[in-house]
Amino acid sequence: MFFRKKEIDTELNVPVHIGIIMDGNGRWAKKRGLPRKMGHREGAKTFRAITRSCKKLGVKYVTYYAFSTENWARPKEEVDGIMDLFDKYLDEVNDFKDENIRIRFIGDRSKLKPSLQNKMLNVEETSRKYSSMDCVLAINYGGRDEICHAVKNIAEMVEFGAIKPKDINEKIITENLYTQDIPPVDLIIRPSGEQRLSNFLIWQAAYSEYYFTNILWPDFKERDLKNAILAYSDRNRRFGGVVEKK
Ligand code: FPP
């Protein structure tokens, strides 16, 4: 799909929160006869560029599916390569300070290398004050795992008498997710031709719109992001009700 010659402007309905499944790195590398890790390396460059584009276009939160709870099943060399990229980029994300972008993480950190966990804490702490946009990295993240984690927290609250089972509602569950204060995701973009959610933000995506494209993540450019936003902006979100399009 080509970018229609209508620029993103204030009349467009820009999503507050975009979720991105960075898919197709392996295929990008294979097409070029390169090792998969080269695809991830290019994918990381796209992550940096698209984060800046999101900010430029007025998005307030962008969440990337960087490493899932299922990705540990990949060959050790590939997993180590992805972890090294996180390490490297966590040093570089300090660059985002010039753009006032806050970095946050969701997922189960306890399985990550302690040095990486420390770096994540430091980055979060230093960038807490940046307020133009939140860039959220889902690392060792799984939607079902996140819900299990929330259920355990809530069960403990019941055990300690802080709440009664009858008090459990959607608000309490939302507050116990890794995303806590992050708004629900409006638009999920998945490149590379796959059309599934793969355990990404399953609670938060209850009313999301989806945008699928065959472009592989390392080839994804700002014009593709604009196309996704244009497609989203044209849709009529009803949230289960009957909202007429203006
Ligand atoms: C999916 O593509 C991609 C991943 C599992 C890893 C994503 C990681 C990065 C882009 C690198 C680091 C990111 C940051 C934020 C620094 P795939 O390997 O499943 O592709 P394929 O389906 O073509 O094999």
Image (cartoon, rainbow, N blue to C red):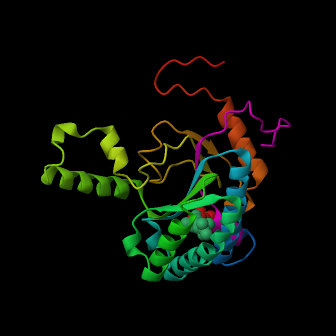
Residue 82 shows in the view: yes
Please indicate whether residue 2 sits to the left or right of residue 103 in the image.
right
The segment highlighted magenta reads 1-29
Please indicate whether residue 1 sits to the left or right of residue 167 in the image.
right
User: Up-down: is 141 above or below 83?
Assistant: above
User: Up-down: is 161 above or below 108?
Assistant: above
Q: Residue at x 65, y 53 (%)?
A: 191
For residue 66, which quarter of the picture? bottom right
User: Up-down: is 6 above or below 102?
Assistant: above
Residue 132 position, x and y percent, is: 64, 52
Quarter holding the N terminus is top right
Tell me if residue 21 is in the magenta stretch: yes
Residue 246 position, x and y percent, is: 66, 18
Residue 216 shows in the view: no
Q: Compare residues 62 and 21 and report the one nearer the observer.
A: 62
Residue 189 position, x and y percent, is: 61, 48
Q: Residue at x 57, y 74 (%)?
A: 86
Residue 192 position, x and y percent, is: 65, 55
Task: Specify the quarter for ligand 1.
Answer: bottom right
The number of discs equals 0
Residue positioned most to the front: 129
Please indicate whether residue 132 sits to the left or right of residue 8 in the image.
left
Tell me if residue 36 is in the magenta stretch: no
- Assign the magenta stretch its main secondary structure: loop
Q: Residue at x 70, y 59 (%)?
A: 99
